[in-house]
Image (cartoon, coloured by chain):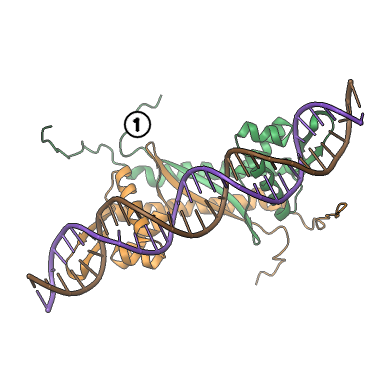
Chain colours: A green, B orange, C purple, D brown
Amino acid sequence: MTKKADDAPGNIEPHVKLWFSSPRAEGVFGDGKWRLLQAIDREGSLRAATQALQISYRKAWGDLRKAEKFLGVRFIERRRGGAGGGEAYLTKDGRAWVAAYGRFRAKVEAAVEREFEAQIAGLQQPVPKETRRRKRTAK
Amino acid sequence: MTKKADDAPGNIEPHVKLWFSSPRAEGVFGDGKWRLLQAIDREGSLRAATQALQISYRKAWGDLRKAEKFLGVRFIERRRGGAGGGEAYLTKDGRAWVAAYGRFRAKVEAAVEREFEAQIAGLQQPVPKETRRRKRTAK
DNA sequence: CATCGTTGTGTTTGCACCAACATATCGTAT
DNA sequence: ATACGATATGTTGGTGCAAACACAACGATG
């Protein structure tokens, strides 16, 4: 129940975005692709994953292709046609990357929270002693 | 002289983007504003700072306004007119934020490097054998 | 062998963001 | 009192990326 002045000028929170780049391409892996792979693992198909994540199939497909191309890793195995029209599931490498990136991200996020408290939180005005902008004037 | 296969599909490096948000606005502070404040401190004016950083004055001005508004902090003191047309310099609060954010950023970046080595670097493929794309029945 | 749902891929539309432009205001120095 | 250079702010145009749209290929299964 944190219920402490939510509209004050202070009360900010840190955010972090992480991604990897190869010398030949920016953003070959990151939060988006990580979440996508997890969703594929859960849902059993790329299409279902994109629907679950509310992102466009077109982009997700392109992202995967890019990641696999520039990392030289096959993340998912795909099958067209067949029962259900097709499917997609994580390879062993895919699972390894998901797990490793999850650990990486968790550690970094922990550092963000910790250092935010240590370095930034102290700057927040404790009590801005009421905005001194007595602007008055009727009507 | 690190000369170890620079065009291989591996050899990726981590990137991080950090920013703070208030409940009422996204991105009220981050690397961009941090660099801007430093530049203002160095250059002595907002205009000179934007020229040094190669960013548009318009955007920098809007960014500063947004940050000061939603954080409730006065980062820079400005003076219009006068000798040289005007000037801008960091307030005490401004300097405190620059320093604190610098420490915050350095710590997080160190964690990124460390955890990248610990969690991700080991996944790199030695040689994934060239993408084999057999041309299909062309026309 | 027709159907169905998914993978795979090209094309177009929309939108968010930023650079660029335009102008007003300000205050000291001359 | 004029000029100058910087702050302050509205407006517009271009650009890149992502959503939306469209459609071909595939292959188990009935």
Query: Can the viewer see residue A58?
Result: yes
| Quadrant placement of the N terminus of chain B | bottom right
Query: Can the viewer see residue A101?
Result: no
* In this picture, residue D25 sits left or right of residue B37: right
* Residue A13 in picture, x, y percent from top left: 42, 40
SS under mark 1: loop
| Quadrant placement of the C terminus of chain B | bottom right
Which residue is painted at 70% across and 55% down in the image? A70
Mark 1 closeness class: few <14, some 14–19, many ≥20 residues within 10 Å: few
Q: Splitting the image into 4 quarters, where does residue A95 fall?
A: top right
Above/below status of D17 relative to A85: below
Which residue is painted at 60% across and 49% down in the image? B115
Comparing A85 with A8, the one in front is A85
Image mark 1: chain: A
Q: Splitting the image into 4 quarters, where does residue A52 fall?
A: top right
* Residue C27 in picture, x, y percent from top left: 13, 63
Above/below status of A2 relative to C16: above
* Residue B134 in picture, x, y percent from top left: 86, 54
Residue at numbered disc 1: A6
* Residue D24 in picture, x, y percent from top left: 79, 43
Which residue is painted at 80% across and 32% down in the image? A85
* In this picture, residue B30 sits left or right of residue B65: right
Tally the marks: 1
Comparing B121 with D10, the one in front is D10
* Kind of residue at disc 1: Asp
* In this picture, residue A137 sits left or right of residue A99: left
Which residue is painted at 42% across and 53% down in the image? B103
Comparing A102 with B37, the one in front is B37
